[in-house]
Every structure is written in structure tokens, then in C-alpha cells.
Image (cartoon, grey):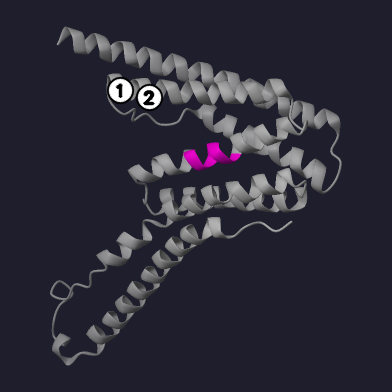
């Protein structure tokens, strides 16, 4: 089955253009360093008098995590297409690529301090689109229990509604993701990987799949309840402070 490529042209063109600009700026910076080193006018100047700045290159490079997140969003479509076409081998390969890209953009953002407001939205959106799509398709195909699909959808819906209410009534929520939420994302990734791997490569023990499903359900309910508790208590405190002021 041939997957249409027109859906990806705009995204790949944007990412390629950004990368070309990074390479051009890097090469320009290298030539500038070479010219300053060889230039006779620089002889006798102290280090404090010769300053080489590369702000443009840094500005471009710091967008790499966001570009990777956008590419991960674009991967959702082919993953779903492969699942619907029962091409689980291709779906597994694309799912692994998406998972590795998630780890890569997280490493770049934290290691090089390239965090951004946009990235704080793109990264979880990419994760949720991928996982939610896989759970819905897996549930439709009978690979994922219906009760687990419902739990995942309800939990994500509660978070979206809570964040929307917080934004409309108070302000954008600036809190960090809870540890239970990160654990839940890890469990969901592991479970979907195991389910697709069970169809693509080798049959896994039913007990292992049931254990991963139970862990995913537990962390889904736990993280959803903690989000409601944390956001709810903070919302009430800020509402009371607003009224008293």
C-alpha cells in the first residue's frame, strides 16, 4: 500500500530550510573566525578587543527541538496508515523513530538550554497525538482493551478541559508536568510498543501484555487524579486570592 507523500511536503520543506540556514550560518561563522585569525589588523589586539559573536547561529540551532517535535507530529499520519493497513512492521519502525525523536529533542532542549514556550506545547502535543491515535486504532482493531482506551481518552480530556478552564478563568498554567504523568507516558509508550511488536515480530506472553495494560491503567488513573487535585487546589487558592484583593 502506497502512502501519499503530499501530506509531508510542507513539513519537510520547512525543516530542510531551517537546517540549510543553520549550515550556512555555521559555515559563515567558521570563515569569519579564519579571517580574523589571519588578518594583520588583529595582531596586537587583546582577547577583550576581539569579540567573535555567533548569535544568529545560536538562534537557529535552538529551534532544532521544535523542528523535531513538528516532524514527530507528521509521523502520526503514516503510523496510523500502517496500522490500518495491517503493516505492523512498518508501524513499529515508525513508532520507534518517533520515540527516539522524543528522546532526542528532550536531550537537546535540556542539555543546551534550548527550552522555549512553543516547545513546551509542541512536545506534549506530539506525544499525545501519537499515543492517542495508536490507542484508538488499537482499540478499534481489538488489540487494546476497550476499557483502557476509554481510560486514556477520559484522562486526556480532563487535562485539556482543566487547562482550558484555568486559562479562561485565570491565566495560562505554567506548572511542570507531574512525575506520575511522565511515568504514565512511559507506560503508554511501552504498552503500545509491546502490542505492535506482538503483531509485527514475535508473539509476546499474554501475561506480559496484561501486566503492561494494568500498569498503564494504574498510572493513567493516578496521574489524572493527581492533576485534578493539584490544579483544583491551586485554582481555588488563586480564586480566593483574587476575590480578597
Q: How crowded is mark 2: few (under 14 residues within 10 Å), some or many (20 or more)?
A: some
Residue at the image point whose x is 39% and y is 64% from the top = 18
Looking at the rendered image, the quarter that the C terminus falls into is top left
Camera-side residue: 221 or 38? 221
Question: How many labels were placed on the picture?
Answer: 2
Q: What stretch is highlighted in magenta?
A: 125-130
Image height check: is 205 above or below 76? Answer: above
Residue at the image point whose x is 58% and y is 41% from the top = 130
Specify whether 147 is left or right of 58: right
> Would you identify the image quadrant in which residue 168 lies?
top left
Specify whether 34 is left or right of 98: left
Residue at the image point whose x is 48% and y is 39% from the top = 125
What's the magenta bit mostly, secondary-structure-wise? helix
Looking at the rendered image, the quarter that the N terminus falls into is bottom right
The image shows residue 128 at horizontal and vertical percentages of 54, 36
Q: Are marks 1 and 2 in contact (CB under 8 Å)?
A: yes
The image shows residue 135 at horizontal and vertical percentages of 66, 33
> Would you identify the image quadrant in which residue 49 lies?
bottom left
* Residue located beneath label 1 in the image: 168
Tell me if residue 164 can be seen: yes
Q: How crowded is mark 1: few (under 14 residues within 10 Å), some or many (20 or more)?
A: few
Residue at the image point whose x is 72% and y is 53% from the top = 90
Image height check: is 30 above or below 6? Answer: below
Specify whether 83 is left or right of 97: right
Label 1 sits on a secondary structure element that is: helix
Camera-side residue: 21 or 219? 21
Q: Which mark is residue 24?
A: none
Image height check: is 52 above or below 156? Answer: below
Q: Is residue 243 magenta?
A: no
* Residue located beneath label 2 in the image: 164
Label 2 sits on a secondary structure element that is: helix
Amino acid at each position: 500500500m502506497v502512502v501519499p507523500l503530499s501530506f509531508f511536503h510542507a513539513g519537510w520543506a520547512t525543516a530542510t530550510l531551517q537546517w540549510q540556514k543553520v549550515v550556512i550560518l555555521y559555515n559563515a561563522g567558521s570563515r569569519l573566525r579564519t579571517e580574523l585569525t589571519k588578518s594583520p589588523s588583529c595582531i596586537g589586539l587583546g582577547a577583550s578587543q576581539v569579540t567573535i559573536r555567533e548569535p544568529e547561529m545560536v538562534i537557529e540551532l535552538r529551534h532544532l527541538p521544535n523542528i523535531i517535535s513538528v516532524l514527530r507530529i507528521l509521523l502520526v499520519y503514516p503510523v496510523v496508515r500502517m496500522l490500518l493497513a495491517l503493516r505492523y512492521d512498518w508501524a513499529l519502525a515508525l513508532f520507534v523513530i518517533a520515540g527516539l525523536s522524543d528522546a532526542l529533542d528532550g536531550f537537546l532542549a535540556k542539555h543546551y538550554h534550548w527550552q522555549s514556550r512553543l516547545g513546551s506545547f509542541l512536545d506534549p502535543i506530539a506525544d499525545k497525538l501519537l499515543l492517542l491515535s495508536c490507542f484508538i486504532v488499537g482499540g478499534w482493531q481489538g488489540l487494546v482493551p476497550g476499557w483502557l482506551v476509554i481510560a486514556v481518552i477520559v484522562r486526556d480530556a480532563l487535562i485539556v478541559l482543566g487547562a482550558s478552564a484555568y486559562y479562561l478563568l485565570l491565566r495560562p498554567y505554567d506548572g511542570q508536568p507531574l512525575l506520575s504523568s511522565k511515568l504514565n507516558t512511559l507506560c503508554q509508550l511501552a504498552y503500545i510498543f509491546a502490542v505492535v511488536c506482538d503483531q509485527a515480530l514475535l508473539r509476546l506472553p499474554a501475561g506480559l501484555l496484561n501486566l503492561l495494560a494494568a500498569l498503564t491503567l494504574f498510572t493513567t488513573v493516578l496521574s489524572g487524579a493527581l492533576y485534578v487535585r493539584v490544579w483544583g487546589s491551586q485554582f481555588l487558592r488563586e480564586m480566593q486570592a483574587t476575590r480578597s484583593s
